[in-house]
Amino acid sequence: MLPTLRASLPYTLALAVLAYIGFYFLPDFAIAQEILIVVGILLAGIIVPVLLDVKGNAADVDTTSAPASDFKGETTTLYVGNLPYRANEDAVKELFQRFGVVLNVRLMKDRQTGRRRGFGFVEVAAKDSNKMIQKLNDFNFQERTLKVREAKERQDSEDSGE
């Protein structure tokens, strides 16, 4: 079961029961009770995930961090592996901004096909890097388990031949 569905299921069922009770006690409503249950569940299935998403985004965002454009200080580059191929820079940036200052996101693409390769690099404030690694390594993002660690320095193939 998806984590979002697992989190919203109790609220959905509670809202469905409340809708059923509300419709049941309306006097001149000549609709079968089964239909009222279905309507309640459908309404709850639409409303609850939207409310949880809004509530979850507001609760997860770290409001104490400064905007990335104003950041002056040391930075660290994090490697992010096992990214979903459909993920874009904005989605990854939004995820990482929950835990600190994000300056730049680069998702790697295949040179020939232009398709994403499933990994990328996120430049973050050095003070926030350890927190991000702790929170987001093995984190389930768009049905994939992310691998987040500090990026290693790139070794050029030209330098190794000398």
Image: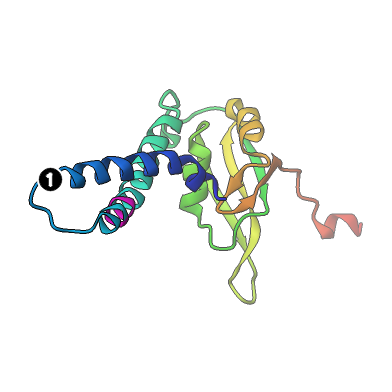
Q: Position of residue 69 (x, y in %)?
A: 42, 37
User: Magenta span covers which residues?
Assistant: 38-42
Q: Is residue 2 left or right of residue 28?
A: right
Q: Quadrant of residue 117?
A: bottom right
Q: Which residue is mark 1?
A: 26
User: Which quarter of the figure is the C terminus placed in?
Assistant: bottom right
Q: Amino acid at mark 1?
A: Leu
Please report the residue visible at 46 percent of the width from the left and 51 percent of the height from the top.
90
Q: Position of residue 24 (x, y in %)?
A: 20, 46
Q: Residue at x 59, y 25 (%)?
A: 127
- Relative image position of residue 124 (x, y in whole percent): 57, 36
**For the image shown, how many numbered marks are present on the structure?**
1
Crowding at dot 1, Cα within 10 Å, few <14 / some 14-19 / many 20+, comes out as few
| Residue drawn where x is 42% and y is 36% of the image | 56
Estimate the x, y position of residue 151 in percent, counting from the top left: 71, 43
- Residue 61 position by quadrant: top left
Q: What is the chief secondary structure element of the magenta stretch?
A: helix
Above/below status of 5 relative to 76: below
| Render colour scheme | rainbow
Determine the residue located farthest toward the right in the rendered image: 162
- Extreme-top residue of the structure: 64
Q: Which is more toward the observer, 154 or 31? A: 31
Q: Nearer the viewer, residue 61 or 5?
A: 5
Residue that protrudes farthest toward the bottom in the picture: 112
Q: Residue drawn 32% across and 48% down?
A: 44
Q: Is residue 61 depicted above or below 159 in this figure?
A: above
Q: Secondary structure at mark 1?
A: loop
Does the stretch in magenta take in 92? no
Q: Nearer the viewer, residue 103 or 155?
A: 103
